[in-house]
Amino acid sequence: MKLLPKAFLSSIAAVAVAGLASTASAVTWDLPAPLGEGNMHTIYLRHFAERVAHYSGGEFQIKVHASQSLIKEKETLKAVRNGQIQIGQFFLYRMGNDHPIYNTSQIPFIAGKADTAWKIWMLSEPKTQELLAKQNSKILIAVTWPETGFYTKEPIKSVDQFKGVKFRTFSPYTSRMAELMGSDPVQIQVSEIAQAFATNLVQVMYTSAQTGVDSQAWDFAKYYTHARGGNRSMTLTVVNDKAYAKLSDKMKTALMMAAKDAQTYGWILCDSLNAKLMKTLEKNGMVVQDPSPELDKKIVEVGETILNEWAKGAGAEGEAVLKAYNSQ
């Protein structure tokens, strides 16, 4: 057996010792994510974790736990605020009852395009950050959802078809939208949608194309009707202030650089995903269609009504968003 040179053995030993030292000083955080592996919001979190490791030279590791496997989405912000976890992802509409500014991305039919959604987020982000700071949290990543539209078993040709039907929504503002369209709003978890359609608990669903694919909407609906992009809800990834403060300057820089990369990637991913999602719906037998002129007119009226209702209660921040929207 040929012996290895002493110099080589010494170099291997040095690397091993360095590796042990690096492991001992490494920082590892668990990041609970509410959605599955194939969802875009999980995909850019995986990218975020990779970039954190890259920028820190492997000394900072983020472990992403998808599908609410670590903690329930509705409990995530509280867990971050209390320091139970250092970092987490949640849906901003959860905070809608606390302050009107949290609801800017929930107003339907005013920010269906990505550039408009970004513009409104830039107006609402400073106040959102200020409010979350009071909950010991700092925004790292904010990414919108893909287009939202109507899922039905029958084609929607008239606004009258919405009257009196049970309408699956997912937030107070989408429930208000259903009411203005003459429907009865019903809030149902994604995992329960198929059963709700099968038992006629709901006849219409308003949600994103991403959720439509995730829930395999073709199993219970036949038609997807565009709705001016719907509303582009925001999903946030936040970090606990104290956990962030404890990081070294190197770790802080790695975290913030990775967050910037992931946010950019998330918005690009979202903007490019719509066409792919629509093709997936069609490939599985769904009919993707534009709204009738009558429905399109109603959509505009509903959006403007909710926007004005929201602005009245949102103070100066609401006036700024309303002005920006009207100046488009």
Image (cartoon, helix red, strand yellow):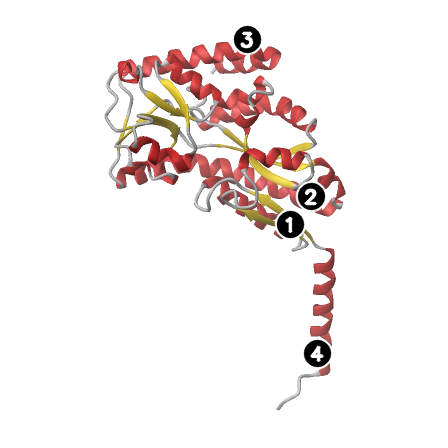
**Residue topped by disc 1:** 55
The kind of secondary structure element at disc 3 is: helix
For the residues carrying marks 4 and 3, which lies nearer the camera in this image? 3
Earlier residue among tags 2 and 3: 2
Dot 1 alpha-carbon crowd within 10 angstroms: few under 14, some 14 to 19, many 20 or more: some
Earlier residue among tags 2 and 1: 1
Q: Quadrant of the N terminus?
A: bottom right
Dot 3 alpha-carbon crowd within 10 angstroms: few under 14, some 14 to 19, many 20 or more: few
**Residue topped by disc 4:** 9
Vertical side of 18 occupied by 279: above or below = above
Real-space CA distance between mark 4 and mark 1, rounded to the nearest whole angstrom: 30 Å
Q: Are marks 2 and 1 in contact (CB under 8 Å)?
A: yes
For the residues carrying marks 2 and 3, which lies nearer the camera in this image? 3
Vertical side of 312 occupied by 232: above or below = below
Earlier residue among tags 2 and 4: 4
Vertical side of 135 occupied by 56: above or below = below
**Residue topped by disc 2:** 253
Q: Position of residue 284 (x, y in %)?
A: 27, 41
Which amino acid does the dot numbered 2 rest on? Thr
Q: Position of residue 115 (x, y in %)?
A: 47, 26
Which amino acid does the dot numbered 4 rest on? Leu
Which amino acid does the dot numbered 1 rest on? Tyr
